[in-house]
Amino acid sequence: MALKIALLPGDGVGPEVLAQAVKCLEAVEETFNQHFIFKEAPVGAIAIDKKGTPLPDATLKLCKESDAVLFGAIGDPKYDNDPDAKVRPEQGLLQLRKELGLFANIRPVLSHPTLLDKSPLKKKVINGTDFVIYRELTGGIYFGEKKLNDDGTKASDLCEYTEDEISRIAHLAFKAAKGRKKKLTLIDKANVLESSRLWRKVVTKIGESYPEVALDFMFVDNAAMQIILNPKQFDVILTENMFGDIISDEGSVIGGSIGLLASASIGEENALFEPIHGSYPQAKGKNIANPIASILSAAMLLEHFGLTEEAWAVKKAVDKSLKKGVVTPDLKENSQYGTNQVGDFIAHNI
Amino acid sequence: MALKIALLPGDGVGPEVLAQAVKCLEAVEETFNQHFIFKEAPVGAIAIDKKGTPLPDATLKLCKESDAVLFGAIGDPKYDNDPDAKVRPEQGLLQLRKELGLFANIRPVLSHPTLLDKSPLKKKVINGTDFVIYRELTGGIYFGEKKLNDDGTKASDLCEYTEDEISRIAHLAFKAAKGRKKKLTLIDKANVLESSRLWRKVVTKIGESYPEVALDFMFVDNAAMQIILNPKQFDVILTENMFGDIISDEGSVIGGSIGLLASASIGEENALFEPIHGSYPQAKGKNIANPIASILSAAMLLEHFGLTEEAWAVKKAVDKSLKKGVVTPDLKENSQYGTNQVGDFIAHNI
Ligand SMILES: CC(C)[C@H](C(=O)O)[C@@H](O)C(=O)O
Ligand SMILES: CC(C)[C@H](C(=O)O)[C@@H](O)C(=O)O
């Protein structure tokens, strides 16, 4: 049965990198005799321009009817510095996460043997790093009530969590830890926040059903330090929405480039795969954006549907491009390879 | 006129490191013919043990009557993992900040020429780093309403800011930038949070009165990455309470040890000086904690009261201890010097 994949290129470099991921999936179709049905729809700033809303109904409908969503990137600087903007591209992504119930964002962080030199961190600090972040994605301060008083002098955001929201992602994270190095670290700010104390209570309780997994706790300020001081201490990190946003971008420095990091956003019925990098508007149309994060998102999609061999072939091809130096300029100064050429090389090697 | 200094040693290694800062201030008294009046009071876990509350009235009164507070550290693990604890040591510090109106927490981040090797970051990345973080300290999610529903299945924290809260610290930060490299970066999450959009609006407006300062904006997730990728790009960072907590602990990896970072918390009428490190309970009583952050807090205190020469003498003496390797084990493996010996050496060199 053919997988239905919704393609949401979005803004900035999104379309360019997504095109490379599609190339790779097409190569998978050929090599492994698979069949995917691709359908494309607008989201983000481009959807605002075309349809007046960052998540048009037709786009949402397509996503709901598909087996998975492959997402490019979102965001346009023209909205960032306008505090009075009524619609924002990011709302499209947030609404999509909410509507599809994508409560768990999964972000693997690995050091790449061929890229140890690219990281601002010392080789001995990062070599061998292999952890994965489980970030809660549809709750917390992102979705709590927002208020602005009438004269615009007071604003607030509510960070709210329920036991159920915590518990469903906690189970996923514990299961992941069971199949890995059997360690789970909850990152919170329980010495200050009531919501963090609820996280600690619920996760501690759930931990009792996973006796083989060692559970520890870390305050988010300390965690921001520990991820740089000693990233090898982590196996599975579990955290709430905002802390996960910060910690996972921070973690990207380990791999040598944010252009390498993919993520999966999982719900009960839907799944979305996207690079963790943003829309990188300065690079738009220049054929210089690194397509690897997007391609690895496609690999995560394949894995999600049990297409292990296929996913492995994609990852192997990515490794080859890294080893051979067929990479974009973020990884090799004055590289002659652009987004397209790297995509072609990887697709060709699948 | 003698400065009245309240000493709040607090928990863990707090008393040990604070004692070294006091030694240094005593050396300043001798060398510069100054006079300080020291009075000590309990705060934190130790105050809970003695008085049943982390901030006893007498302690608060002493602080209010003093010209400045010199603070050790706060926190005890026995409270961290108890979601039902009714009182917590940290409340003492938070309440103190609020009661004294300490709205601006100022944290300098510098690379130390003699310690470049100690950082997990590469030399070329950090060499020459010199920025300062202005963290709002009495607002935001730390102090907004906290709720837990009756059956303990739902918890929330409110992040709230007013124009006035933003504006008073923004002015301090712009003034600081004017006297430095004339760049101010506001860290926020304006693409998601209403409160961040208020920050952006207010800071943009205030920026117009400081035309010589270049103002830019950075989302907190990106900032967590940029601080590691390229810390030299920053001059003055301005941010809200929670983001400041995370970003400044993260920034500590640049200096080579969190045991070096001091901070000043400033209000209209009061000022408090403390190391940014915590109570480090594992090291308590072992004479191994690095006293330099506490000693540099004392130097910030001197600077705050215009005692520039005195502050300079303390900083010079700290530099000497670093250069001569008279440092605690966090900075030199198997160092024969303990907290006390380093304190003695520095005091002796003032
Ligand atoms: C674009 C933005 C709203 C988003 C987020 O903060 O979740 C992004 O930073 C991410 O991490 O996917
Ligand atoms: C102890 C804790 C409440 C405090 C904070 O989060 O503000 C500490 O981490 C700090 O940064 O001073």
Image (spheres, coloured by chain):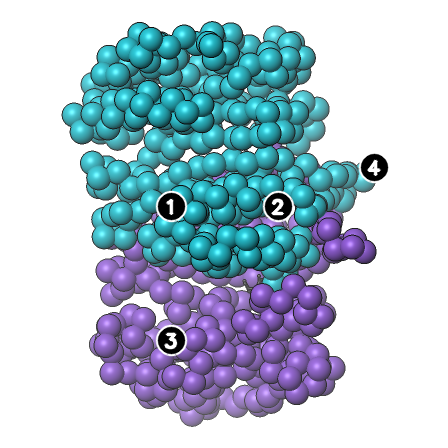
Chain colours: A purple, B cyan
Asked whether the residues under marks 4 and 2 belong to the same chain, the reply is: yes
- Give the amino acid type for the residue marked by disc 4 in the picture: Asp
Residue mark closest to the camera, 3 vs 4: 3
- Decide: marks 3, 2 in contact (CB < 8 A)? no
Residue situated in front as seen by the camera: B211 or A98: B211
SS label for mark 2: helix
CA distance separating discs 3 and 2: 40 Å
The answer to whether marks 1 and 4 sit on the same chain is yes
**Figure label count:** 4
Q: Position of residue B344 (x, y in %)?
A: 27, 12
Say which residue label 3 marks. A290
Q: Name the residue under label 4.
A: B150
Q: Which residue is drawn at 81% across and 40% down?
A: B149
Query: For residue B49, what is the image quadrant?
Result: top right
Q: Which amino acid does label 2 sit on?
A: Ser
Residue B249 visible? The answer is yes
In the image, the residue with mark 3 has its CB under 8 Å from the nearest atom of ligand 1? no
**Of the residues tagged 1 and 4, which is closer to the observer?**
1
Amino acid type, mark 3: Asn
Mark 3 or mark 2, whichever is nearer to me: 2
Q: Are marks 3 and 4 on the same chain?
A: no
Q: Earlier in the sequence, mark 1 or mark 4?
A: 4
Instruction: Please give the label number shown on residue B180.
Output: 1
